[in-house]
Amino acid sequence: MEGVDLETAEEERQSGHGLPASLESEDWKKSHWGLLVTGVVGGALVTVYAVATPFITPALRKVCLPFVPATSKQVENVVKMLRHRRGPLVDIGSGDGRIVIAAAKEGFPAVGYELNPWLVWYSRYRAWREGVHGSAKFYISDLWKVSFAHYSNVVIFGVPQMMPQLEEKLELELVDEARVIACRFPFPRWTPDHTTGEGIDTVWAYDMSACRARERRSDQEAAGLRASSSETQSKPLDIE
Protein backbone atom coordinates (compact mmCIF):
# COMPACT_ATOMS: atom_id res chain seq x y z
CA MET A 1 0.00 0.00 0.00
CA GLU A 2 2.76 2.41 0.86
CA GLY A 3 4.30 1.85 -2.57
CA VAL A 4 0.95 2.49 -4.26
CA ASP A 5 0.47 5.78 -2.34
CA LEU A 6 3.89 7.02 -3.35
CA GLU A 7 3.25 6.14 -6.97
CA THR A 8 -0.15 7.90 -6.87
CA ALA A 9 1.37 11.03 -5.38
CA GLU A 10 4.10 11.00 -8.01
CA GLU A 11 1.53 10.60 -10.78
CA GLU A 12 -0.55 13.49 -9.41
CA ARG A 13 2.52 15.70 -9.22
CA GLN A 14 3.52 14.87 -12.78
CA SER A 15 -0.02 15.23 -14.14
CA GLY A 16 -0.54 18.61 -12.37
CA HIS A 17 -3.40 17.44 -10.07
CA GLY A 18 -1.45 18.21 -6.86
CA LEU A 19 -1.26 21.76 -5.27
CA PRO A 20 1.55 23.89 -6.66
CA ALA A 21 4.22 24.89 -4.15
CA SER A 22 3.33 28.59 -4.57
CA LEU A 23 -0.30 27.97 -3.52
CA GLU A 24 0.77 25.91 -0.53
CA SER A 25 3.10 28.72 0.53
CA GLU A 26 0.32 31.32 0.11
CA ASP A 27 -2.09 29.27 2.22
CA TRP A 28 0.55 28.95 4.93
CA LYS A 29 1.14 32.72 4.91
CA LYS A 30 -2.60 33.43 5.20
CA SER A 31 -2.92 31.02 8.10
CA HIS A 32 0.15 32.53 9.76
CA TRP A 33 -1.17 36.11 9.42
CA GLY A 34 -4.60 35.05 10.65
CA LEU A 35 -3.10 33.62 13.82
CA LEU A 36 -0.94 36.71 14.26
CA VAL A 37 -3.88 39.12 13.88
CA THR A 38 -5.98 37.04 16.27
CA GLY A 39 -3.18 37.09 18.82
CA VAL A 40 -2.67 40.85 18.50
CA VAL A 41 -6.40 41.62 18.83
CA GLY A 42 -6.75 39.25 21.76
CA GLY A 43 -3.73 40.75 23.49
CA ALA A 44 -5.04 44.28 22.92
CA LEU A 45 -8.42 43.38 24.44
CA VAL A 46 -6.77 41.83 27.48
CA THR A 47 -4.60 44.92 27.92
CA VAL A 48 -7.59 47.28 27.62
CA TYR A 49 -9.49 45.18 30.15
CA ALA A 50 -6.58 45.14 32.59
CA VAL A 51 -6.08 48.91 32.36
CA ALA A 52 -9.75 49.95 32.31
CA THR A 53 -11.12 47.64 35.00
CA PRO A 54 -9.51 49.46 37.99
CA PHE A 55 -11.04 52.73 36.75
CA ILE A 56 -14.49 51.28 35.99
CA THR A 57 -14.91 49.06 39.05
CA PRO A 58 -15.28 51.94 41.58
CA ALA A 59 -18.26 53.22 39.58
CA LEU A 60 -20.02 49.89 40.25
CA ARG A 61 -19.68 50.22 44.02
CA LYS A 62 -22.53 51.39 46.20
CA VAL A 63 -20.59 54.53 47.09
CA CYS A 64 -18.42 55.63 44.18
CA LEU A 65 -15.27 57.68 44.76
CA PRO A 66 -14.15 58.54 41.22
CA PHE A 67 -10.67 59.71 40.33
CA VAL A 68 -10.71 63.44 39.63
CA PRO A 69 -7.23 65.03 39.85
CA ALA A 70 -6.87 67.84 42.36
CA THR A 71 -6.23 71.27 40.89
CA SER A 72 -3.04 73.10 41.80
CA LYS A 73 -5.15 75.57 43.80
CA GLN A 74 -6.77 72.76 45.77
CA VAL A 75 -3.35 71.35 46.62
CA GLU A 76 -2.20 74.82 47.66
CA ASN A 77 -5.27 75.27 49.89
CA VAL A 78 -4.75 71.88 51.55
CA VAL A 79 -1.14 72.76 52.30
CA LYS A 80 -2.34 76.07 53.75
CA MET A 81 -4.62 74.19 56.16
CA LEU A 82 -1.65 72.08 57.25
CA ARG A 83 0.47 75.02 58.39
CA HIS A 84 1.66 74.74 62.00
CA ARG A 85 0.39 71.15 62.08
CA ARG A 86 2.40 68.05 62.96
CA GLY A 87 1.97 64.31 62.91
CA PRO A 88 1.23 61.71 60.24
CA LEU A 89 -1.10 62.51 57.37
CA VAL A 90 -3.41 60.28 55.33
CA ASP A 91 -5.12 61.02 52.04
CA ILE A 92 -8.28 58.92 51.63
CA GLY A 93 -8.58 58.06 47.96
CA SER A 94 -5.16 59.43 47.04
CA GLY A 95 -5.57 59.22 43.23
CA ASP A 96 -2.30 60.07 41.51
CA GLY A 97 -0.62 60.98 44.80
CA ARG A 98 -0.26 64.73 44.42
CA ILE A 99 -1.65 65.59 47.89
CA VAL A 100 0.53 63.00 49.64
CA ILE A 101 3.61 64.15 47.74
CA ALA A 102 2.90 67.82 48.53
CA ALA A 103 2.49 66.98 52.23
CA ALA A 104 5.70 64.95 52.23
CA LYS A 105 7.54 67.94 50.79
CA GLU A 106 6.25 69.96 53.77
CA GLY A 107 7.81 67.44 56.16
CA PHE A 108 4.81 65.23 56.95
CA PRO A 109 5.07 61.45 57.00
CA ALA A 110 2.25 60.93 54.50
CA VAL A 111 0.23 57.90 53.38
CA GLY A 112 -2.28 57.49 50.58
CA TYR A 113 -4.92 54.78 50.31
CA GLU A 114 -6.31 54.07 46.86
CA LEU A 115 -8.27 51.19 45.29
CA ASN A 116 -6.88 51.61 41.77
CA PRO A 117 -3.56 49.71 41.54
CA TRP A 118 -2.44 51.65 38.44
CA LEU A 119 -2.79 54.94 40.33
CA VAL A 120 -0.94 53.52 43.33
CA TRP A 121 1.99 52.37 41.17
CA TYR A 122 2.05 55.70 39.37
CA SER A 123 1.98 57.56 42.71
CA ARG A 124 4.95 55.55 43.94
CA TYR A 125 6.83 56.42 40.77
CA ARG A 126 5.99 60.13 41.19
CA ALA A 127 7.14 60.06 44.82
CA TRP A 128 10.42 58.47 43.75
CA ARG A 129 10.85 61.03 40.96
CA GLU A 130 10.13 63.90 43.37
CA GLY A 131 12.60 62.52 45.91
CA VAL A 132 10.08 61.94 48.72
CA HIS A 133 9.56 58.17 48.41
CA GLY A 134 10.97 57.76 51.92
CA SER A 135 8.14 59.77 53.53
CA ALA A 136 5.33 59.30 50.98
CA LYS A 137 3.79 55.82 51.00
CA PHE A 138 0.90 54.45 48.96
CA TYR A 139 -1.23 51.37 49.54
CA ILE A 140 -3.97 49.55 47.63
CA SER A 141 -6.86 49.40 50.09
CA ASP A 142 -10.55 50.06 50.64
CA LEU A 143 -11.02 53.10 52.89
CA TRP A 144 -13.82 51.37 54.82
CA LYS A 145 -11.41 48.59 55.84
CA VAL A 146 -8.68 50.91 57.13
CA SER A 147 -8.45 52.41 60.61
CA PHE A 148 -7.38 56.07 60.69
CA ALA A 149 -6.96 56.16 64.46
CA HIS A 150 -3.22 56.94 64.42
CA TYR A 151 -3.38 59.81 61.90
CA SER A 152 -3.30 63.43 63.06
CA ASN A 153 -4.22 64.89 59.69
CA VAL A 154 -6.81 63.44 57.32
CA VAL A 155 -7.50 64.68 53.78
CA ILE A 156 -10.53 63.58 51.78
CA PHE A 157 -11.73 64.45 48.28
CA GLY A 158 -15.16 62.92 48.77
CA VAL A 159 -18.58 62.84 47.16
CA PRO A 160 -21.86 63.78 48.90
CA GLN A 161 -23.09 60.16 49.11
CA MET A 162 -20.17 59.02 51.24
CA MET A 163 -19.70 62.00 53.56
CA PRO A 164 -22.28 61.09 56.27
CA GLN A 165 -20.91 57.56 56.68
CA LEU A 166 -17.30 58.75 56.60
CA GLU A 167 -18.12 61.45 59.16
CA GLU A 168 -19.32 58.77 61.59
CA LYS A 169 -16.26 56.59 60.95
CA LEU A 170 -13.79 59.41 61.55
CA GLU A 171 -15.63 60.61 64.64
CA LEU A 172 -15.30 57.15 66.16
CA GLU A 173 -11.64 56.63 65.24
CA LEU A 174 -9.78 59.95 65.37
CA VAL A 175 -8.16 61.50 68.44
CA ASP A 176 -9.16 64.97 69.63
CA GLU A 177 -5.95 66.50 68.25
CA ALA A 178 -6.75 65.36 64.71
CA ARG A 179 -7.75 67.69 61.88
CA VAL A 180 -9.87 66.59 58.93
CA ILE A 181 -9.55 68.51 55.67
CA ALA A 182 -12.40 68.09 53.19
CA CYS A 183 -12.12 69.17 49.56
CA ARG A 184 -14.94 69.81 47.06
CA PHE A 185 -17.70 68.75 49.48
CA PRO A 186 -18.08 69.54 53.22
CA PHE A 187 -19.30 67.15 55.89
CA PRO A 188 -23.05 67.31 56.52
CA ARG A 189 -23.14 67.68 60.34
CA TRP A 190 -19.80 69.11 61.35
CA THR A 191 -19.20 72.85 61.42
CA PRO A 192 -15.85 73.77 59.85
CA ASP A 193 -13.31 75.59 62.01
CA HIS A 194 -11.48 77.02 58.99
CA THR A 195 -12.42 77.57 55.35
CA THR A 196 -10.34 78.74 52.41
CA GLY A 197 -10.73 78.94 48.64
CA GLU A 198 -13.71 79.46 46.37
CA GLY A 199 -15.91 77.24 44.20
CA ILE A 200 -14.45 73.80 43.50
CA ASP A 201 -11.21 74.87 45.17
CA THR A 202 -12.91 75.39 48.55
CA VAL A 203 -11.33 73.49 51.44
CA TRP A 204 -12.92 72.95 54.85
CA ALA A 205 -10.91 72.11 57.98
CA TYR A 206 -12.47 70.41 61.01
CA ASP A 207 -10.68 70.10 64.35
CA MET A 208 -12.01 67.01 66.10
CA SER A 209 -11.80 68.52 69.60
CA ALA A 210 -14.00 71.44 68.52
CA CYS A 211 -16.40 69.18 66.63
CA ARG A 212 -16.88 66.96 69.67
CA ALA A 213 -17.32 69.95 71.98
CA ARG A 214 -20.06 71.33 69.72
CA GLU A 215 -21.65 67.88 69.56
CA ARG A 216 -21.73 67.66 73.37
CA ARG A 217 -23.25 71.13 73.70
CA SER A 218 -25.86 70.24 71.11
CA ASP A 219 -26.71 67.02 72.95
CA GLN A 220 -26.95 68.87 76.28
CA GLU A 221 -29.22 71.52 74.77
CA ALA A 222 -31.42 68.85 73.21
CA ALA A 223 -31.59 67.00 76.55
CA GLY A 224 -32.51 70.24 78.32
CA LEU A 225 -35.30 70.93 75.85
CA ARG A 226 -36.67 67.42 76.27
CA ALA A 227 -36.59 67.72 80.06
CA SER A 228 -38.32 71.11 79.92
CA SER A 229 -40.98 69.78 77.57
CA SER A 230 -41.56 66.74 79.78
CA GLU A 231 -41.84 68.91 82.89
CA THR A 232 -44.37 71.19 81.20
CA GLN A 233 -46.50 68.26 80.09
CA SER A 234 -46.49 66.63 83.54
CA LYS A 235 -47.30 69.87 85.46
CA PRO A 236 -50.96 69.82 86.65
CA LEU A 237 -53.29 72.47 85.31
CA ASP A 238 -54.81 75.00 87.81
CA ILE A 239 -58.60 74.83 87.54
CA GLU A 240 -60.54 77.61 89.28
Image (spheres, rainbow, N blue to C red):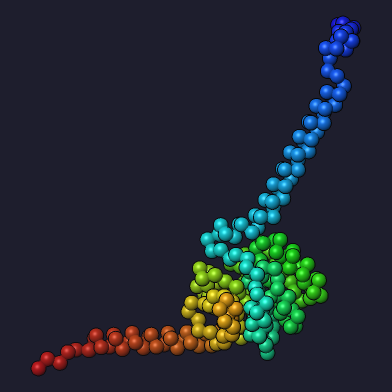
Residue at the spot 33% in from the left edge and 84% down from the top edge:
226
Q: Quadrant of the C terminus?
A: bottom left
Q: Residue 136, how many percent across, how many down?
A: 75, 74
Q: Which residue ends up furthest to the left in the rendered image?
A: 240
Q: Residue 119, how many percent across, how many down?
A: 70, 64
Depth order, front residue of 212/58: 58
Residue at the spot 65% in from the left edge and 54% down from the top edge:
53
Depth order, front residue of 51/156: 51
Residue at the spot 61% in from the left edge and 57% down from the top edge:
56
Residue 140 picture quarter: bottom right
Q: Quadrant of the N terminus?
A: top right
Indicate left or right for 63 with 142 as reference: left
Query: Looking at the image, is 44 positioned above or below residue 192?
Result: above
Res 220 seen here? yes
Indicate left or right for 58 with 218 as reference: right
Q: Residue 175, how many percent across, how many down?
A: 60, 82
Count all numbered tags in the image, as a single digit: 0
Residue at the spot 61% in from the left edge and 86% down from the top edge:
177
Query: Looking at the image, is 233 positioned above or below residue 166?
Result: below
Depth order, front residue of 70/216: 70
Res 151 seen here? no
Q: Which residue ends up furthest to the bottom in the rendered image?
A: 240
Depth order, front residue of 192/17: 17
